[in-house]
Amino acid sequence: MLVNQLVGWRSCAVLLAMMLLPVVLLVANFHTGTELVRLRNAMVFNVISAEQSQWPGDQFPESFRQELAPLPQAIARVIISPEQADEPLALMLQQAAVLNLDQRRRGGAIQADVSTTLAKIQQQQGYCADYTEVINVFGYALNIPVREWALAFDGFGGHGHAINEIWDQQAKRWIMLDVFNGFYPVNQQQQPLSVLEFKQLLIEDQSQIGLVRLSDKTFGFKDDASALAYYHNGRHQFYLWWANDNISYDQQPLIKLAAKVSPHLEQMVAILIGQFPQLMAIAEPDNLHLINNMQRLKIMLWALFFYELVLLLMLLAMLITLLGRRRARI
């Protein structure tokens, strides 16, 4: 009798209200695009030290997802034939020339598969993460180890910027490359800097940094000082994306299906099936409060997910029971 009283349409309505209320409160507090990115970042948020990010490009960590899939035809068509003596940076810049880096850009984020992204970038569209995605694939095609960094200006949320880093096997060093903003940094000896070297000099002595422009037309700032001020604002919020398998990601069936609905659904599905790259924030004394905030948000979001899942299963069980009762009466 008690079960019959509990399982009713009113109980279903209560369960539905219990499911909707926390979601409504969450959306009310995180309703802008950058805040929605914060929620996504929190769900895949992890922490490493600067030392843990300094592995060489010929020894990727086992947990780092590297590309193994064949090149899409649209990508294979634009890949250049490298000379044996070409240095990785020179080779990547030759390859990146197919992105029309000397022409001014227009348009916002593309958020599509890599072949579509390449085509739209060649039409002067796209945003920083679109460029890093294509550079990841170019590195794979040219056998140049590559990884993707980002920095944030709002506590690891959506207000930030993405850049690449390529591995020079001969010099045994990483080289930072910001294709979207059209430069790579060097020291006073004109030696290219890694991301962490660039980051450290932003903090210690910006006068030691020089910026080699890929094109004056598409350099993303009024002058070098403006560029350094921009990156200085994010000096304590650098993080690595723990994957460069953009082609494999695009080809995952569930992700492809969700992408047809919306980019937000695509990313949520990718997170739930473990295909979205993990975010590895670089921990340091000056950002521990930001890291703690993101870790608390991560716990809250995953707790909310399992809370919603349990209530959904209960709701489905109730609906099945109620429909069964209705059929029994007919």
Image (spheres, rainbow, N blue to C red):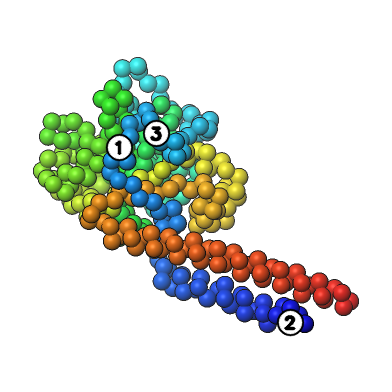
Q: How far apart in space, not on screen, are marks 3 and 1 (Cα)?
A: 10 Å
Q: Kindly indicate whether the residue at mark 3 contacts the one at mark 2 (C-beta within 8 angstroms).
A: no
The residue at which mark 3 appears reads as: 60
- On the image, the x and y values in percent for residue 126 come to 39, 47
Query: Which mark identifies residue 42?
Result: none
In the image, taking residue 291 as reference, residue 79 lies left or right, namely right
Asked whether residue 125 is in view, the answer is no
> In the displayed structure, would residue 116 be above or below residue 171?
below
Foreground residue among 151 and 183: 151
Identify the residue at horizontal 33%, vertical 31% (top origin). Answer: 56
Identified by mark 2, the residue type is: Leu
Residue at (89%, 76%) from the top-left corner? 330
Q: Dot 1, crowdedness within 10 Å: few (<14), some or many (≥20)? A: few
Tag 1's secondary structure? Answer: loop
Q: Nearer the viewer, mark 2 or mark 3?
A: 2
Which label's residue is closer to the chain start, 2 or 3?
Answer: 2
- The local crowd at label 3, few if under 14, some if 14 to 19, many if 20 or more residues have their Cα within 10 Å, is few
User: Is label 3 in a helix, a strand or a loop?
Assistant: loop
Residue behind mark 1: 54
Question: Which quadrant holds residue 244?
Answer: top left
- How many angstroms separate mark 2 from mark 3 (CA)? 58 Å
Q: Are marks 3 and 1 in contact (CB under 8 Å)?
A: no
Measured as percent of width and height from the top left, residue 96 is found at: 35, 33
Does residue 264 appear in this view?
yes
| Badge 3 amino acid | Phe
Q: To which residue does mark 2 refer?
A: 2
Residue 330 relative to residue 183: left or right? right
